[in-house]
Amino acid sequence: MEFLKKSWKWVVGIVGFFIGFVWFMNANSSKKVKRIKKNIKSNKRKTKKVDRKIEEVKKEKKKTKKKIAKTNQELKNVRKKKPKVKKRTGKQSSKALKDRLKKSN
């Protein structure tokens, strides 16, 4: 008992220090939590913007694929319609040219 009577100030000081330390850490952590929550909200907004951009790019990609498929189909059709060139001798080609000229006059 004599120990407590002589050193009660030290015991109260140590207990007060621990209570103050816990209180300080708790207050500091609540500020950190608020800051973290704010960062989470801002990150959610940013991810929503990025998601919208991704959706737009996907739509553009689909449109582009459709255009490419349409163009490829048109090219196939043009290749099918392209006349085959017959190999002719010089005499045959000159005769064909003369005949066409006669028809056009």
Image: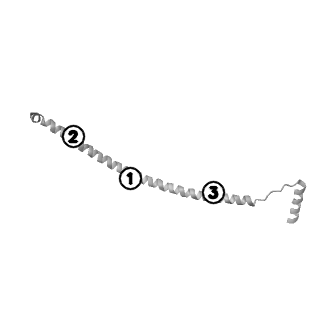
Specify few, some or many for label 1: CA neighbours under 10 Å numbering under 14, 14-19, or 20 or more: few
Q: Amino acid at mark 1?
A: Lys
| Res 50 visible | yes
Please state which amino acid type lies under the numbered disc 2: Phe
Horizontal side, residue 38 vs residue 9: left or right: right
Residue 105 visible in the snapshot: no
**Residue 2 location (% of width, % of height):** 9, 34
Q: Position of residue 95 (x, y in %)?
A: 90, 59
**Residue plotted at (61% across, 59% down):** 66
Mark 1 residue element: helix
Residue assigned mark 3: 68
Which residue is denoted by mark 1 in the rendering? 41
Residue 88 spot, x, y in % from top left: 86, 55
Disc 3 from disc 2: Cα separation: 72 Å
Specify the label residue 100 is tagged with. none
Residue tagged by mark 2? Answer: 18
**Left or right relative to 63: residue 23:** left
